[in-house]
Amino acid sequence: MKKILCAILTIFSVMATAAAGSVTASERNPKREFRGAWLHVIGQNQWQDKSTEQAKAYIRDQFDKLAGTGCNTVIFQVRPTADAVYRSELEPWSAWLTGKRGKAPSPMWDPMEYAIGEAHKRGMEFHAWLNPYRVTSTAKEVLPASHDSNKEPHRFFRYNGQILFDPAYQENRDFICKVVKDIVDRYDIDGIHIDDYFYPYPAPGKKIPDDASYRKFADGQNIADWRRKNVDLLIEQLHSTIKEAKPWVRFGVSPFGIWRNKRTDPRGSESTGLQNYDDLYADVILWAKKGWVDYLAPQLYWSLDTKAAPSRHLAQWWNDNANGADIYIGWDVKRTMDSPDPGNNDRNELDTKVRLSRRLPNVKGNVWWHGYWVTGNYKGAADSLAMKYQSTIALPPAYGDLKKTPKSVSEIKIDKTGEEAFLSWEAPRRGPSESESDVVRYAVYEFFPGEPQDTGDPQTIVALTPFTRVRIYPEPGVTFAVTALDRMNRESHPIFIYYK
Protein backbone atom coordinates (compact mmCIF):
# COMPACT_ATOMS: atom_id res chain seq x y z
CA MET A 1 0.00 0.00 0.00
CA LYS A 2 1.28 3.41 -0.88
CA LYS A 3 1.29 5.92 1.95
CA ILE A 4 0.76 9.63 1.80
CA LEU A 5 -1.25 11.96 3.92
CA CYS A 6 -2.91 15.24 3.15
CA ALA A 7 -2.33 17.69 5.97
CA ILE A 8 -5.43 17.47 8.15
CA LEU A 9 -7.12 14.82 6.06
CA THR A 10 -5.53 11.54 7.02
CA ILE A 11 -8.07 8.98 5.93
CA PHE A 12 -8.75 10.37 2.48
CA SER A 13 -5.36 10.08 0.90
CA VAL A 14 -4.58 6.54 2.02
CA MET A 15 -6.52 4.18 -0.18
CA ALA A 16 -6.45 0.41 -0.40
CA THR A 17 -5.04 -0.89 -3.67
CA ALA A 18 -5.13 -4.63 -3.09
CA ALA A 19 -6.89 -6.42 -5.90
CA ALA A 20 -9.17 -9.40 -5.62
CA GLY A 21 -8.15 -12.53 -7.47
CA SER A 22 -6.11 -12.03 -10.59
CA VAL A 23 -7.75 -8.71 -11.61
CA THR A 24 -5.63 -5.70 -10.73
CA ALA A 25 -7.04 -2.46 -9.31
CA SER A 26 -5.96 -0.53 -12.40
CA GLU A 27 -7.92 -2.90 -14.64
CA ARG A 28 -10.93 -2.57 -12.42
CA ASN A 29 -10.85 1.10 -11.45
CA PRO A 30 -10.46 3.90 -14.04
CA LYS A 31 -8.40 7.01 -13.44
CA ARG A 32 -11.33 9.24 -14.40
CA GLU A 33 -14.76 8.50 -12.96
CA PHE A 34 -17.66 10.41 -11.47
CA ARG A 35 -18.31 8.84 -8.07
CA GLY A 36 -21.22 10.70 -6.54
CA ALA A 37 -23.65 10.25 -3.68
CA TRP A 38 -26.95 11.99 -3.05
CA LEU A 39 -27.45 13.42 0.44
CA HIS A 40 -31.05 14.52 0.79
CA VAL A 41 -32.45 16.78 3.49
CA ILE A 42 -36.17 16.29 2.85
CA GLY A 43 -37.58 13.59 5.12
CA GLN A 44 -34.37 13.51 7.17
CA ASN A 45 -35.39 14.62 10.66
CA GLN A 46 -31.87 14.20 12.02
CA TRP A 47 -30.96 17.64 10.67
CA GLN A 48 -33.54 19.56 12.71
CA ASP A 49 -32.69 17.59 15.84
CA LYS A 50 -29.09 18.85 15.86
CA SER A 51 -27.47 21.99 17.18
CA THR A 52 -25.28 24.01 14.83
CA GLU A 53 -22.10 22.32 16.04
CA GLN A 54 -23.69 18.88 15.93
CA ALA A 55 -24.89 19.51 12.37
CA LYS A 56 -21.42 20.62 11.33
CA ALA A 57 -19.93 17.50 12.90
CA TYR A 58 -22.54 15.41 11.09
CA ILE A 59 -21.58 16.93 7.72
CA ARG A 60 -17.90 16.25 8.43
CA ASP A 61 -18.69 12.67 9.42
CA GLN A 62 -20.79 12.02 6.31
CA PHE A 63 -18.16 13.54 4.02
CA ASP A 64 -15.37 11.64 5.80
CA LYS A 65 -17.17 8.37 5.18
CA LEU A 66 -17.99 9.14 1.55
CA ALA A 67 -14.40 10.16 0.84
CA GLY A 68 -13.22 7.02 2.58
CA THR A 69 -15.21 4.93 0.09
CA GLY A 70 -13.61 6.71 -2.86
CA CYS A 71 -16.49 9.07 -3.70
CA ASN A 72 -15.31 12.30 -5.29
CA THR A 73 -18.61 14.20 -5.54
CA VAL A 74 -21.32 15.14 -3.05
CA ILE A 75 -24.76 15.98 -4.44
CA PHE A 76 -26.25 17.87 -1.51
CA GLN A 77 -29.89 18.92 -1.35
CA VAL A 78 -30.14 22.67 -0.74
CA ARG A 79 -33.69 23.49 -1.96
CA PRO A 80 -36.16 20.65 -1.37
CA THR A 81 -39.46 22.61 -1.37
CA ALA A 82 -38.97 26.20 -2.55
CA ASP A 83 -36.96 26.79 0.61
CA ALA A 84 -33.28 27.12 1.49
CA VAL A 85 -30.65 25.13 3.34
CA TYR A 86 -28.48 28.24 2.99
CA ARG A 87 -28.74 31.99 3.54
CA SER A 88 -31.25 33.34 1.04
CA GLU A 89 -33.13 36.58 0.58
CA LEU A 90 -35.39 34.90 -1.98
CA GLU A 91 -36.79 31.90 -0.09
CA PRO A 92 -37.29 30.95 3.57
CA TRP A 93 -35.10 28.69 5.66
CA SER A 94 -36.09 25.05 5.20
CA ALA A 95 -38.24 23.37 7.82
CA TRP A 96 -36.25 20.22 7.13
CA LEU A 97 -33.23 22.02 8.61
CA THR A 98 -34.75 23.89 11.56
CA GLY A 99 -38.16 22.29 12.14
CA LYS A 100 -40.19 25.27 10.89
CA ARG A 101 -40.26 26.98 7.51
CA GLY A 102 -38.64 30.39 7.78
CA LYS A 103 -36.99 29.71 11.14
CA ALA A 104 -33.29 30.53 10.98
CA PRO A 105 -30.74 28.21 12.57
CA SER A 106 -29.42 29.29 15.94
CA PRO A 107 -26.59 29.97 16.34
CA MET A 108 -26.67 31.25 12.77
CA TRP A 109 -24.67 29.39 10.15
CA ASP A 110 -24.87 28.64 6.43
CA PRO A 111 -25.04 24.85 5.90
CA MET A 112 -24.34 25.01 2.16
CA GLU A 113 -21.34 27.28 2.58
CA TYR A 114 -19.98 24.99 5.29
CA ALA A 115 -20.63 21.84 3.26
CA ILE A 116 -18.91 23.28 0.19
CA GLY A 117 -15.82 24.04 2.23
CA GLU A 118 -15.74 20.58 3.78
CA ALA A 119 -16.23 18.85 0.41
CA HIS A 120 -13.43 20.87 -1.18
CA LYS A 121 -11.08 20.17 1.74
CA ARG A 122 -11.45 16.51 0.91
CA GLY A 123 -10.76 17.07 -2.79
CA MET A 124 -14.44 16.40 -3.59
CA GLU A 125 -16.78 18.29 -5.88
CA PHE A 126 -19.97 19.86 -4.49
CA HIS A 127 -23.12 19.86 -6.62
CA ALA A 128 -26.04 21.90 -5.25
CA TRP A 129 -29.24 19.87 -5.64
CA LEU A 130 -32.56 21.68 -6.12
CA ASN A 131 -36.11 20.64 -6.81
CA PRO A 132 -37.40 23.26 -9.27
CA TYR A 133 -41.21 23.09 -9.03
CA ARG A 134 -42.21 21.63 -5.65
CA VAL A 135 -43.42 24.17 -3.05
CA THR A 136 -44.82 21.83 -0.39
CA SER A 137 -44.35 18.12 0.15
CA THR A 138 -47.57 17.35 2.09
CA ALA A 139 -51.13 18.61 2.30
CA LYS A 140 -50.62 19.49 5.97
CA GLU A 141 -48.16 22.32 5.33
CA VAL A 142 -49.69 25.79 5.56
CA LEU A 143 -47.83 28.60 3.82
CA PRO A 144 -47.86 32.16 5.16
CA ALA A 145 -50.17 34.75 3.62
CA SER A 146 -47.14 36.52 2.18
CA HIS A 147 -46.16 33.52 0.06
CA ASP A 148 -46.56 33.98 -3.69
CA SER A 149 -48.87 30.96 -3.86
CA ASN A 150 -51.34 32.92 -1.73
CA LYS A 151 -50.69 36.32 -3.31
CA GLU A 152 -50.70 35.08 -6.93
CA PRO A 153 -52.45 31.69 -6.81
CA HIS A 154 -52.85 31.55 -10.61
CA ARG A 155 -49.08 30.81 -10.87
CA PHE A 156 -49.45 27.59 -8.86
CA PHE A 157 -51.57 24.50 -8.73
CA ARG A 158 -52.40 21.89 -6.12
CA TYR A 159 -52.02 18.25 -7.03
CA ASN A 160 -52.17 15.15 -4.86
CA GLY A 161 -51.71 17.12 -1.66
CA GLN A 162 -48.84 19.28 -2.89
CA ILE A 163 -48.49 22.86 -4.09
CA LEU A 164 -46.35 23.26 -7.20
CA PHE A 165 -45.21 26.06 -9.47
CA ASP A 166 -47.19 25.91 -12.71
CA PRO A 167 -44.48 25.33 -15.37
CA ALA A 168 -46.52 27.32 -17.89
CA TYR A 169 -45.70 30.71 -16.39
CA GLN A 170 -42.62 32.64 -17.48
CA GLU A 171 -42.71 34.39 -14.09
CA ASN A 172 -42.09 31.02 -12.48
CA ARG A 173 -39.25 30.15 -14.82
CA ASP A 174 -37.70 33.54 -14.14
CA PHE A 175 -37.99 33.07 -10.40
CA ILE A 176 -36.48 29.56 -10.41
CA CYS A 177 -33.60 30.85 -12.52
CA LYS A 178 -33.19 33.80 -10.15
CA VAL A 179 -32.78 31.36 -7.26
CA VAL A 180 -30.21 29.35 -9.22
CA LYS A 181 -28.29 32.46 -10.30
CA ASP A 182 -28.14 33.61 -6.68
CA ILE A 183 -26.56 30.29 -5.69
CA VAL A 184 -24.13 30.26 -8.62
CA ASP A 185 -23.08 33.86 -8.03
CA ARG A 186 -22.52 33.58 -4.28
CA TYR A 187 -21.20 30.07 -3.75
CA ASP A 188 -18.15 28.20 -5.02
CA ILE A 189 -20.14 25.24 -6.28
CA ASP A 190 -19.05 22.79 -8.97
CA GLY A 191 -22.50 21.89 -10.25
CA ILE A 192 -26.23 22.62 -10.20
CA HIS A 193 -28.27 19.44 -10.02
CA ILE A 194 -32.03 18.97 -10.40
CA ASP A 195 -33.90 15.75 -9.84
CA ASP A 196 -36.76 13.88 -11.49
CA TYR A 197 -39.75 16.00 -10.45
CA PHE A 198 -41.03 18.01 -13.40
CA TYR A 199 -44.77 17.85 -13.92
CA PRO A 200 -45.90 15.75 -10.95
CA TYR A 201 -45.87 11.98 -10.97
CA PRO A 202 -49.37 10.85 -11.95
CA ALA A 203 -51.70 9.89 -9.10
CA PRO A 204 -54.57 7.49 -9.88
CA GLY A 205 -57.80 9.30 -10.64
CA LYS A 206 -56.26 12.79 -10.40
CA LYS A 207 -55.90 15.32 -13.21
CA ILE A 208 -53.31 18.11 -13.30
CA PRO A 209 -55.36 21.30 -12.79
CA ASP A 210 -53.71 23.45 -15.45
CA ASP A 211 -56.72 24.03 -17.73
CA ALA A 212 -56.62 27.79 -17.20
CA SER A 213 -52.95 28.17 -18.11
CA TYR A 214 -53.43 25.81 -21.07
CA ARG A 215 -56.21 28.01 -22.43
CA LYS A 216 -54.06 31.08 -21.82
CA PHE A 217 -50.76 29.91 -23.31
CA ALA A 218 -51.14 26.79 -25.47
CA ASP A 219 -51.82 28.57 -28.79
CA GLY A 220 -53.21 25.47 -30.45
CA GLN A 221 -50.66 22.91 -29.18
CA ASN A 222 -51.95 19.65 -27.80
CA ILE A 223 -51.63 19.58 -24.03
CA ALA A 224 -48.83 17.00 -23.86
CA ASP A 225 -46.59 18.84 -26.33
CA TRP A 226 -47.38 22.12 -24.58
CA ARG A 227 -46.39 20.76 -21.17
CA ARG A 228 -43.14 19.37 -22.57
CA LYS A 229 -42.41 22.74 -24.17
CA ASN A 230 -42.89 24.44 -20.79
CA VAL A 231 -40.29 22.19 -19.20
CA ASP A 232 -37.95 22.56 -22.18
CA LEU A 233 -38.07 26.33 -21.74
CA LEU A 234 -37.03 26.06 -18.09
CA ILE A 235 -34.14 23.69 -18.84
CA GLU A 236 -32.86 25.92 -21.64
CA GLN A 237 -33.13 29.02 -19.46
CA LEU A 238 -31.44 27.31 -16.52
CA HIS A 239 -28.54 26.31 -18.76
CA SER A 240 -28.13 29.87 -20.01
CA THR A 241 -28.41 31.30 -16.51
CA ILE A 242 -25.68 29.03 -15.16
CA LYS A 243 -23.26 29.34 -18.06
CA GLU A 244 -23.58 33.12 -18.34
CA ALA A 245 -22.67 33.45 -14.66
CA LYS A 246 -19.94 30.80 -14.38
CA PRO A 247 -19.27 28.68 -17.49
CA TRP A 248 -17.45 26.01 -15.48
CA VAL A 249 -20.43 25.16 -13.23
CA ARG A 250 -21.92 21.95 -14.58
CA PHE A 251 -25.65 21.49 -15.03
CA GLY A 252 -26.92 17.99 -14.37
CA VAL A 253 -30.32 16.29 -14.25
CA SER A 254 -31.18 12.98 -12.61
CA PRO A 255 -34.29 11.85 -14.52
CA PHE A 256 -36.57 8.92 -13.87
CA GLY A 257 -34.89 5.91 -15.44
CA ILE A 258 -37.19 5.40 -18.46
CA TRP A 259 -37.44 7.95 -21.27
CA ARG A 260 -40.05 6.02 -23.27
CA ASN A 261 -40.94 2.36 -23.62
CA LYS A 262 -40.33 0.67 -26.94
CA ARG A 263 -44.00 -0.29 -27.22
CA THR A 264 -44.76 3.46 -27.21
CA ASP A 265 -41.85 4.58 -29.37
CA PRO A 266 -39.43 2.38 -31.37
CA ARG A 267 -36.60 4.58 -30.06
CA GLY A 268 -37.51 3.64 -26.48
CA SER A 269 -36.16 1.01 -24.11
CA GLU A 270 -37.13 -2.58 -23.44
CA SER A 271 -39.29 -1.64 -20.46
CA THR A 272 -42.93 -1.16 -19.52
CA GLY A 273 -42.84 1.42 -16.72
CA LEU A 274 -43.73 5.06 -16.29
CA GLN A 275 -42.23 7.33 -18.96
CA ASN A 276 -40.43 10.66 -18.61
CA TYR A 277 -41.69 11.89 -21.96
CA ASP A 278 -45.35 10.96 -21.57
CA ASP A 279 -46.00 11.07 -17.82
CA LEU A 280 -43.62 13.74 -16.47
CA TYR A 281 -43.44 15.75 -19.73
CA ALA A 282 -39.65 15.68 -19.65
CA ASP A 283 -37.95 15.13 -23.02
CA VAL A 284 -34.61 14.38 -21.41
CA ILE A 285 -32.73 13.20 -24.48
CA LEU A 286 -33.74 16.38 -26.33
CA TRP A 287 -32.04 18.42 -23.60
CA ALA A 288 -28.85 16.45 -24.08
CA LYS A 289 -29.04 16.79 -27.86
CA LYS A 290 -29.51 20.56 -27.58
CA GLY A 291 -26.54 20.84 -25.20
CA TRP A 292 -28.70 22.22 -22.39
CA VAL A 293 -27.37 19.71 -19.83
CA ASP A 294 -23.81 18.63 -19.15
CA TYR A 295 -24.69 15.29 -17.61
CA LEU A 296 -27.62 12.98 -16.96
CA ALA A 297 -27.80 10.69 -13.95
CA PRO A 298 -30.77 8.42 -14.78
CA GLN A 299 -32.24 6.79 -11.71
CA LEU A 300 -31.94 3.09 -12.47
CA TYR A 301 -33.06 2.05 -9.02
CA TRP A 302 -34.40 -1.33 -10.08
CA SER A 303 -32.71 -4.69 -9.95
CA LEU A 304 -30.77 -5.87 -12.98
CA ASP A 305 -33.61 -7.96 -14.39
CA THR A 306 -36.77 -6.32 -13.01
CA LYS A 307 -39.37 -7.24 -15.62
CA ALA A 308 -40.89 -3.77 -16.11
CA ALA A 309 -37.61 -1.88 -15.86
CA PRO A 310 -34.47 -4.04 -16.15
CA SER A 311 -31.61 -1.76 -15.12
CA ARG A 312 -29.16 -3.98 -17.01
CA HIS A 313 -30.79 -3.05 -20.33
CA LEU A 314 -31.68 0.50 -19.33
CA ALA A 315 -28.02 1.29 -18.63
CA GLN A 316 -27.22 0.24 -22.20
CA TRP A 317 -30.11 2.34 -23.53
CA TRP A 318 -28.93 5.52 -21.79
CA ASN A 319 -25.40 4.89 -23.03
CA ASP A 320 -26.71 4.57 -26.59
CA ASN A 321 -28.83 7.72 -26.30
CA ALA A 322 -26.42 10.01 -24.45
CA ASN A 323 -26.57 12.60 -27.26
CA GLY A 324 -23.29 14.15 -26.17
CA ALA A 325 -24.00 14.39 -22.45
CA ASP A 326 -22.02 12.43 -19.87
CA ILE A 327 -24.06 9.63 -18.32
CA TYR A 328 -23.66 8.76 -14.65
CA ILE A 329 -25.85 5.87 -13.57
CA GLY A 330 -27.87 6.34 -10.38
CA TRP A 331 -28.02 3.05 -8.47
CA ASP A 332 -30.18 2.24 -5.43
CA VAL A 333 -27.74 1.01 -2.78
CA LYS A 334 -30.29 -0.90 -0.70
CA ARG A 335 -31.90 -2.70 -3.62
CA THR A 336 -28.45 -3.44 -5.08
CA MET A 337 -27.22 -5.01 -1.86
CA ASP A 338 -30.53 -6.81 -1.19
CA SER A 339 -30.79 -8.42 -4.64
CA PRO A 340 -28.84 -11.61 -5.35
CA ASP A 341 -27.17 -11.93 -8.74
CA PRO A 342 -27.41 -15.58 -9.82
CA GLY A 343 -25.75 -14.86 -13.14
CA ASN A 344 -22.63 -13.71 -11.32
CA ASN A 345 -22.98 -16.27 -8.50
CA ASP A 346 -23.08 -13.32 -6.12
CA ARG A 347 -25.29 -12.45 -3.17
CA ASN A 348 -25.75 -8.88 -4.41
CA GLU A 349 -25.68 -6.95 -7.69
CA LEU A 350 -22.91 -4.46 -6.91
CA ASP A 351 -20.17 -6.16 -8.91
CA THR A 352 -22.25 -6.51 -12.07
CA LYS A 353 -23.58 -2.96 -11.89
CA VAL A 354 -20.16 -1.37 -11.45
CA ARG A 355 -18.63 -3.49 -14.22
CA LEU A 356 -21.57 -2.68 -16.49
CA SER A 357 -21.12 1.06 -15.98
CA ARG A 358 -17.41 0.82 -16.79
CA ARG A 359 -17.97 -1.24 -19.92
CA LEU A 360 -20.26 1.34 -21.53
CA PRO A 361 -18.28 4.10 -23.31
CA ASN A 362 -20.67 7.01 -22.64
CA VAL A 363 -21.18 6.11 -18.99
CA LYS A 364 -18.55 8.05 -17.06
CA GLY A 365 -19.46 7.12 -13.50
CA ASN A 366 -22.01 6.19 -10.88
CA VAL A 367 -24.13 7.97 -8.29
CA TRP A 368 -25.24 6.19 -5.14
CA TRP A 369 -28.79 6.62 -3.80
CA HIS A 370 -28.78 7.44 -1.15
CA GLY A 371 -25.54 8.49 0.42
CA TYR A 372 -26.74 7.60 3.91
CA TRP A 373 -26.86 3.94 2.91
CA VAL A 374 -23.23 4.26 1.85
CA THR A 375 -22.11 6.06 5.00
CA GLY A 376 -24.11 3.57 7.07
CA ASN A 377 -22.30 0.72 5.29
CA TYR A 378 -25.55 -1.02 4.42
CA LYS A 379 -24.78 -4.74 4.07
CA GLY A 380 -21.11 -3.87 3.56
CA ALA A 381 -21.66 -1.49 0.62
CA ALA A 382 -19.08 1.02 1.90
CA ASP A 383 -16.55 -1.73 2.56
CA SER A 384 -16.96 -3.09 -0.96
CA LEU A 385 -16.55 0.34 -2.51
CA ALA A 386 -13.52 1.25 -0.39
CA MET A 387 -11.66 -2.02 -0.76
CA LYS A 388 -12.55 -3.01 -4.30
CA TYR A 389 -14.65 -0.90 -6.66
CA GLN A 390 -13.42 2.54 -5.60
CA SER A 391 -10.17 1.57 -3.92
CA THR A 392 -8.08 3.93 -6.04
CA ILE A 393 -8.49 7.70 -6.11
CA ALA A 394 -10.37 8.85 -9.23
CA LEU A 395 -10.28 12.28 -10.83
CA PRO A 396 -13.73 13.49 -11.92
CA PRO A 397 -14.32 13.55 -15.69
CA ALA A 398 -12.79 16.52 -17.51
CA TYR A 399 -14.98 18.68 -19.71
CA GLY A 400 -14.88 21.79 -21.86
CA ASP A 401 -12.10 22.23 -24.41
CA LEU A 402 -9.83 19.32 -23.54
CA LYS A 403 -7.02 20.78 -25.67
CA LYS A 404 -6.58 23.40 -22.97
CA THR A 405 -4.57 22.40 -19.92
CA PRO A 406 -3.82 24.41 -16.80
CA LYS A 407 -0.38 25.66 -15.92
CA SER A 408 1.86 23.27 -14.01
CA VAL A 409 2.94 23.73 -10.42
CA SER A 410 6.44 24.98 -9.61
CA GLU A 411 9.00 24.97 -6.80
CA ILE A 412 8.22 21.39 -5.84
CA LYS A 413 10.23 20.23 -2.82
CA ILE A 414 10.39 17.80 0.07
CA ASP A 415 10.90 19.11 3.61
CA LYS A 416 11.74 17.01 6.65
CA THR A 417 10.92 18.16 10.18
CA GLY A 418 12.07 15.60 12.70
CA GLU A 419 10.40 12.34 11.81
CA GLU A 420 7.88 14.01 9.49
CA ALA A 421 8.21 14.73 5.77
CA PHE A 422 6.10 17.00 3.57
CA LEU A 423 5.79 17.45 -0.16
CA SER A 424 4.99 21.04 -1.16
CA TRP A 425 4.79 23.15 -4.31
CA GLU A 426 3.85 26.59 -5.59
CA ALA A 427 0.42 27.04 -7.14
CA PRO A 428 0.13 28.50 -10.65
CA ARG A 429 -0.73 32.17 -10.60
CA ARG A 430 -4.35 33.11 -11.15
CA GLY A 431 -5.73 35.98 -13.19
CA PRO A 432 -7.53 38.98 -11.73
CA SER A 433 -10.99 37.38 -11.99
CA GLU A 434 -12.40 33.88 -11.66
CA SER A 435 -11.89 31.70 -14.71
CA GLU A 436 -12.45 28.14 -15.85
CA SER A 437 -8.66 27.76 -16.03
CA ASP A 438 -8.17 28.53 -12.32
CA VAL A 439 -6.35 25.70 -10.58
CA VAL A 440 -8.46 24.38 -7.71
CA ARG A 441 -6.98 20.95 -6.88
CA TYR A 442 -3.87 18.89 -7.23
CA ALA A 443 -3.23 15.23 -7.89
CA VAL A 444 -0.21 13.68 -6.20
CA TYR A 445 1.43 10.54 -7.62
CA GLU A 446 3.98 8.21 -6.07
CA PHE A 447 6.25 5.83 -8.00
CA PHE A 448 8.42 3.16 -6.42
CA PRO A 449 11.92 2.39 -7.76
CA GLY A 450 11.67 0.60 -11.11
CA GLU A 451 7.97 1.39 -11.47
CA PRO A 452 6.93 3.14 -14.72
CA GLN A 453 6.33 6.81 -14.04
CA ASP A 454 2.93 6.66 -15.68
CA THR A 455 0.42 9.21 -14.39
CA GLY A 456 -2.27 7.37 -16.32
CA ASP A 457 -2.14 4.54 -13.79
CA PRO A 458 -4.77 5.21 -11.08
CA GLN A 459 -2.90 3.04 -8.59
CA THR A 460 -0.17 5.67 -8.43
CA ILE A 461 -2.51 8.50 -7.34
CA VAL A 462 -2.10 8.97 -3.61
CA ALA A 463 -3.88 12.28 -3.00
CA LEU A 464 -6.42 14.60 -4.55
CA THR A 465 -6.28 17.81 -2.56
CA PRO A 466 -6.86 21.59 -2.71
CA PHE A 467 -3.78 22.14 -0.55
CA THR A 468 -0.24 22.82 -1.75
CA ARG A 469 1.36 20.73 0.99
CA VAL A 470 0.80 17.10 1.91
CA ARG A 471 2.46 14.83 4.40
CA ILE A 472 4.38 11.93 2.88
CA TYR A 473 6.08 8.77 4.06
CA PRO A 474 8.89 8.48 1.52
CA GLU A 475 11.20 5.56 1.03
CA PRO A 476 14.61 5.86 -0.67
CA GLY A 477 14.33 5.88 -4.44
CA VAL A 478 10.68 6.96 -4.56
CA THR A 479 9.60 9.58 -7.09
CA PHE A 480 6.65 11.91 -6.58
CA ALA A 481 4.74 13.88 -9.19
CA VAL A 482 2.21 16.68 -8.83
CA THR A 483 -0.32 17.86 -11.42
CA ALA A 484 -2.75 20.77 -11.27
CA LEU A 485 -6.47 20.47 -12.06
CA ASP A 486 -8.54 23.45 -13.17
CA ARG A 487 -12.25 24.07 -12.62
CA MET A 488 -13.03 21.89 -15.65
CA ASN A 489 -11.00 19.01 -14.15
CA ARG A 490 -8.42 19.33 -16.92
CA GLU A 491 -4.98 18.21 -15.78
CA SER A 492 -1.62 19.91 -16.24
CA HIS A 493 1.64 18.27 -17.16
CA PRO A 494 3.26 16.56 -14.17
CA ILE A 495 6.25 17.93 -12.28
CA PHE A 496 8.46 15.23 -10.72
CA ILE A 497 10.75 15.10 -7.71
CA TYR A 498 13.03 12.24 -6.69
CA TYR A 499 13.54 11.31 -3.04
CA LYS A 500 17.06 10.04 -2.39
Image (spheres, rainbow, N blue to C red):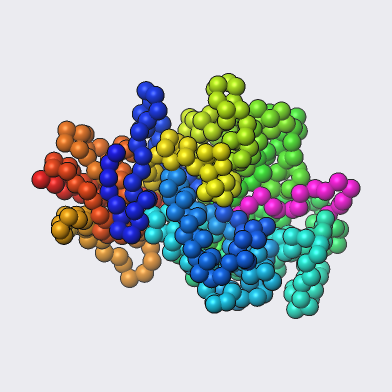
Q: Is residue 416 left or right of residue 393?
A: left
Q: Which residues are magenta?
A: 191-208
Residue furthest to the right in view is: 205
Position in image of residue 240 (x %, y %): 55, 60
Position in image of residue 70 (x %, y %): 43, 45
Instruction: For residue 384, say whether it is visible.
Output: yes
Residue 249 vs 457, above or below: the answer is below
Magenta: main secondary structure: loop
- Residue closer to the observer: 231 or 185: 185
Q: Is residue 392 magenta?
A: no
Query: Total number of numbered labels?
Result: 0
Q: Is residue 200 magenta?
A: yes
- The residue shown at (70%, 53%) is 198
Position in image of residue 451 (x %, y %): 20, 34
Position in image of residue 63 (x %, y %): 47, 55
- The residue shown at (61%, 28%) is 340
Quarter occupied by residue 316? top right
